[in-house]
Structure formats: C-alpha cells, structure tokens
Image (cartoon, helix red, strand yellow):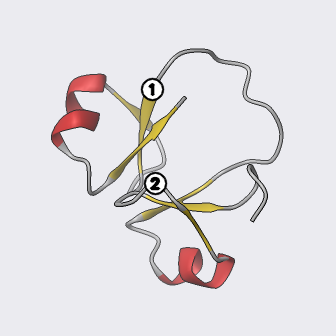
Amino acid sequence: MAKGGGFRSAGTGRYVSASNGRSHPRTTVHEAAGKSGSSGTHYRSAISGRYVTTKHGKASPGTTVREE
C-alpha cells in the first residue's frame, strides 16, 4: 500500500488493509493522504486518534503509533 491515506497498525506500525483497519478501530489509525505539515517525531493514540505525549506514547506501544 502506498504511504498516506491508509490504515496503520498501532502494534506493528505497518500499513494494513482497509478492511483490517475498519475491523480493528481500537488498534489501527487511519491516516490522511498527503504530506503532513509538522516535523519531528510524535505519537498518536489508535483509540482516540488524538496526539499524545511522548511519555504516554512510549508507555503504551500497543495502542499508539509513532509518526515521523
């Protein structure tokens, strides 16, 4: 799958199929297509979709996605 606009697993960080992403909304993140305007590493919750602190992201690798 091309980068951007797909679903990514919070556990592995790998892109997964759209059907898998929709079937597991608590452990996958839907990414918007296109280039992100921010820089640096940050973490996003797979459950809420919101950005979380680095401390929380590192403490919860199964439910957060590291974005660069």
Which corner quadrant of the image does residue 18 belong to? bottom right
Q: Residue at x 29, y 24 (%)?
A: 54
Q: Is residue 56 above or below residue 64?
A: above
Q: Quadrant of the C terminus?
A: top right
Residue at image location 74% in from the left, 65% down from the top:
1
Q: Residues within 10 Å of mark 2 (few under 14, many from 20)?
A: some
Examine the image and state in which quarter residue 35 appears: top right
Q: Earlier in the sequence, mark 2 or mark 1?
A: 2
Residue type at the position of mark 2: Gly
The mark found on residue 60 in the picture is none
Q: Secondary structure under badge 2?
A: loop
Reply above or below: 18 against 58.
below
Residue 58: x and y, percent? Answer: 23, 35
Residue at 38% x, 67% y is 26
Residue 24's x, y, as percent?
45, 77
Give, as a three-letter code, the residue at label 1: His
Q: Which mark is residue 42?
A: 1
Discs 2, 1 touching: Cβ within 8 Å: no
Question: At which x and y percent is residue 32?
Answer: 73, 48
Q: Relative to residue 29, is residue 66 depicted above or below? A: above
- Foreground label between 2 and 1: 2
Q: Is residue 31 left or right of residue 52?
A: right
Instruction: Please give left or right for residue 63 compared with residue 32 in the image.
Output: left
Disc ID at residue 13: 2
Q: Residues within 10 Å of mark 1 (few under 14, many from 20)?
A: some
Q: Residue furthest top?
A: 39
Q: Secondary structure at mark 1?
A: strand
* CA separation in Å, label 2 and label 1: 13 Å
Q: Residue furthest right?
A: 34
In-image side of 8 versus 4 (left or right) = left
Does 38 appear above or below 22? above
